[in-house]
Image (cartoon, grey):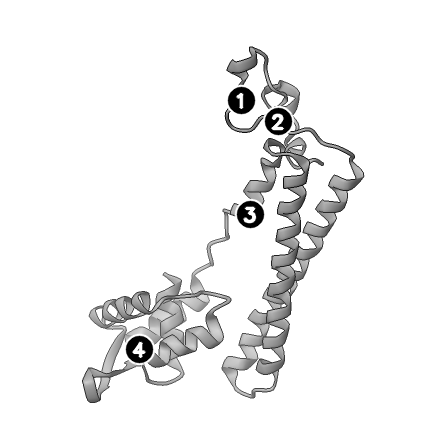
Amino acid sequence: MSLRHAMLGLLARGPASGYDLLKAFEASLANVWPATQSQLYTELGRLTDAGLIAVQAEGPRGRKEYRITQQGREELWHWLTEVEPDPPRRNDALLRVFFLDQVDPGQARAYLERRAAAAAAQEAALLGLREQVAAQDDPLARYGLLSLEYGVRISAAVREWAQWAVEQLDAGGALAPANPAGPAATTADTGTASPADSPAHAANPSAATGG
C-alpha cells in the first residue's frame, strides 16, 4: 500500500499530473520506493475510484491534473500516525551468503566483493545526491534528507560488513565447499553424507557463512 500513500503524500503538497508524479518519484523517491510509469497510472485510477484524489483539470491530449481530496488527506494522516510500517523480513543477498558453502571459496569471496562494490557505489551515489538535496529549502527536501541519510548509512554498513566478511574468509584459510563437484554431484553418487547434511553442521548455522 505504500505506493498509494507515496502518491497521496506528493499530491498533498500540490496538484500534479501523472507525468509530474513520475518525475517526482525518479528525482526524490527512487531510492525509497521506486515505481514504474504503468504502476503509477494504474494507481492513479484506483485512487480516483476510491475518492482519495480527483481530477482538477484536463489539458491538451487528455493530460489530467490531480488533486488530493479531504478523504485522501485523512487516509494519509491515518497512515502516517496510526499504521506501523511492516518490517522487512526477506533479504535475497543475505540468503545467498548463508549457502555460500555450496560453492568454492573463490566464488564465495568474489560474491562478497561484489556486494562490497555495489554498496560502495550506492553510498557514493547517495552522498552526491545528499549535496543536492541539502542545498534545497523546502519541507520535502528537509525530510527527504533524513530518508537519504538512512540510505547512506545503510550502504556504508553493508559495505563495511562485506569487506569484513572477505577478511574472515581470508583469515580462515582454504574452505572446501560442501559439494566440490557442483550441482551434479550428490550424496547418492558417493553413498556418503556431505558435511552440510551432518547434525553438527545443521546445529551451527554460522558454518554456512564461513564464520
Q: Is residue 74 above or below residue 193?
A: below
Q: Which of marks 1 and 2 precedes in the sequence?
A: 2
| Amino acid type, callout 3 | Ala
Q: Which of marks 4 and 3 precedes in the sequence?
A: 4
Q: Is residue 57 above or below residue 75?
A: below
Residue located beneath label 3 in the image: 93
Residue located beneath label 2 in the image: 180
Residue located beneath label 4 in the image: 18
Q: Depth-wise, is mark 4 or mark 1 nearer the camera?
A: 1
Q: Position of 34 compared to 154: left or right? A: left
Instruction: Verify CB contact (< 8 Å) between mark 2 and mark 1.
Output: yes
| Amino acid type, callout 1 | Ala
Secondary structure of the residue carrying tag 1 is loop
Quarter occupied by residue 12: bottom left
Quarter occupied by residue 96: top right
For the point 66% across and 54% down, the residue is 116
Q: Which of marks 2 and 3 precedes in the sequence?
A: 3
Secondary structure of the residue carrying tag 3 is helix
Instruction: Report how far apart the C-alphas of labels 2 and 4 lie in the structure.
Output: 53 Å
Instruction: Verify CB contact (< 8 Å) between mark 4 and mark 1.
Output: no
Instruction: Report how far apart the C-alphas of labels 2 and 1 lie in the structure.
Output: 8 Å
